[in-house]
Every structure is written in structure tokens, then in C-alpha cells.
Image (spheres, helix red, strand yellow):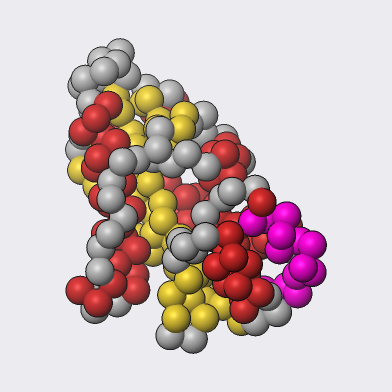
């Protein structure tokens, strides 16, 4: 999928603005060797300030990408810097399922989501010296029925709720919900010529 631009990607230091090994695994499935660097961006944007859920999720992902890009710029001048950021939001009806307050809240959320049709929003941002590319992918997903033991196991892992939902989806064979947007964005970047404007590191 990424063969046409792999030789160009080799000139980049690819950083995933996340601390989630699960997201790293999904990126690696695309053949990208990305290092993890959790963003310190405060995810405190008010969804009420945005017209669409997609605008909100993209703004959050962009905040993560820009913070990591600014922090790492100039650290390693041997390669150009490419930061990939993603943010996932799960909704059920009109309720947004964000980060749970505690373990009990996480159990409540996963119990509500279990066996229900949820809409998942994933915002993806690619940030490099030549600019920004971003988009949001949405999907209606029928969440499989989880047992109490499964829910407790996910909660005990310590991952935030959106990541827990991704893990559940992966186990149900729906990992493409997250990985396909990255493939799609790589094709966009290639068609736009963004990767071909400069072959020398900044």
C-alpha cells in the first residue's frame, strides 16, 4: 500500500504522538517504523464550541501533533520530522464516551456500549515541515457482547476508554477502522505531491 512513497518515508523520523502500544502496532501494520512520544497537549477542548464531532476530533488530534512537532523539531536534524496524531471518540446516541473518571466509570461505559450500535470517530493528523493533512473517519459499529470478565480485564489494563474500545474492535476483526484512515491519508499525501517537494532533510 505504501510502496510508492516508502523510499521517501525513509528520510523521515516518524513519530506517533501517543503513548499507546496498541496504536503503534496498528501503524506498524502499515509498514511504518514509528516511535512513540506521548503529547502533553491538554485535551480540554469543549465539544460545544464545534459544529460537528469531526471538527472537534480533528482539533484535538491537531493539538497533539503540533505540540509534539514543536517539542521535537531540531532535536535530530539528520532526518525530517513527521508526526502522526490520532484521536478516537466513541458515541452512543448523543452521548460522548470520553475518558472515564475512574475504573467504575469505565466499567459503566463499556457495559453500556456492549451489544449496542456505536458511532466511532477517528481524527488523523499528519504534521510535517511542509504543512498539515487531516481528516476524520467515522463508522457505525455494532459492539460485540462483552462478559463482565472481559470488561474487567480491559479496565484493569489501564488504557483510556477509546483505546479499550479499539482493543475490543480489534478482537472483533474491525481493526481497519483505525488502520484504513492511515492508508487513505498516505495515498492523499502521495497524490498531492507533499512528499516530493523536497528530498533533503530540513
- Please say whether residue 56 is visible from this viewpoint: yes
Residue in front for this viewpoint, 147 or 14: 147
Could you tell me which quadrant the N terminus lies in? Answer: top right
From the viewer's perspective, is residue 171 above or below residue 41?
below
- Residue reaching furthest bottom? 93
Residue 114, position as x, y percentages in the image: 68, 75
Residue nearer the viewer, 62 or 137: 62
Toward which corner of the image does residue 25 lie, by quadrant? top right
Q: Please state if 161 lies on the left or on the right of 11 as rendered.
A: right
Could you tell me which residue is drawn at 28 percent across and 59 percent down?
A: 44
Residue at screen point 55% across, 68% down: 105
Q: How many marks?
A: 0
Q: Which residues are magenta?
A: 140-155
Is residue 123 shown above or below 197? below
How far across and down, in percent of the image, does residue 142 sit? Answer: 66, 77
Question: Considering only vertical position in the picture, is 81 above or below 103?
Answer: above
The image quadrant where one finds the C terminus is: top left
Residue 9: percent from left, percent from top: 41, 29
Whether the magenta-drawn stretch holds residue 179 is answered as no
- Residue in front for this viewpoint, 139 or 19: 19
87 and 176: which one is in front?
87
Placement of 175 over or under 127, stated as above or below: below
For image coordinates 43% across by 24% down, the residue present is 10
Q: Position of residue 29 (x, y in %)?
A: 61, 41
Is residue 5 something one can see in this rendering?
no
Residue 104, located in which quarter of the rendered image?
bottom right
Image point 28% across, 72% down: which residue?
47
Amino acid at each position: 500500500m505504501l510502496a510508492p512513497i516508502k523510499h521517501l518515508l525513509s528520510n523521515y523520523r516518524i513519530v506517533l504522538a501517543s503513548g499507546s502500544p496498541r496504536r503503534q502496532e496498528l501503524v506498524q501494520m502499515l509498514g511504518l517504523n514509528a516511535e512513540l512520544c506521548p503529547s502533553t497537549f491538554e485535551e480540554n477542548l469543549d465539544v460545544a464550541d464545534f459544529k460537528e464531532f469531526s471538527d472537534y476530533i480533528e482539533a484535538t488530534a491537531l493539538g497533539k501533533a503540533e505540540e509534539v512537532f514543536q517539542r521535537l523539531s531540531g532535536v535530530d536534524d539528520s532526518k525530517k520530522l513527521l508526526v502522526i496524531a490520532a484521536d478516537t471518540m466513541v458515541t452512543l446516541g448523543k452521548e460522548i464516551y470520553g475518558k472515564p473518571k475512574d475504573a467504575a466509570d469505565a466499567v459503566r461505559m463499556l457495559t453500556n456500549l456492549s451489544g449496542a450500535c456505536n458511532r466511532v470517530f477517528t481524527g488523523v493528523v499528519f504534521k510535517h515541515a511542509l504543512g498539515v493533512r487531516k481528516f476524520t473517519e467515522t463508522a457505525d459499529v455494532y459492539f460485540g457482547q462483552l462478559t463482565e470478565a472481559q470488561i474487567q480485564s480491559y479496565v484493569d489494563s489501564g488504557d483510556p476508554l477509546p483505546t479499550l474500545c479499539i482493543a475490543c474492535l480489534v478482537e472483533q476483526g474491525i481493526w481497519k477502522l483505525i488502520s484504513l484512515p492511515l492508508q487513505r491519508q498516505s495515498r492523499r499525501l502521495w497524490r498531492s505531491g507533499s512528499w516530493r517537494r523536497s528530498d533533503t532533510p530540513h
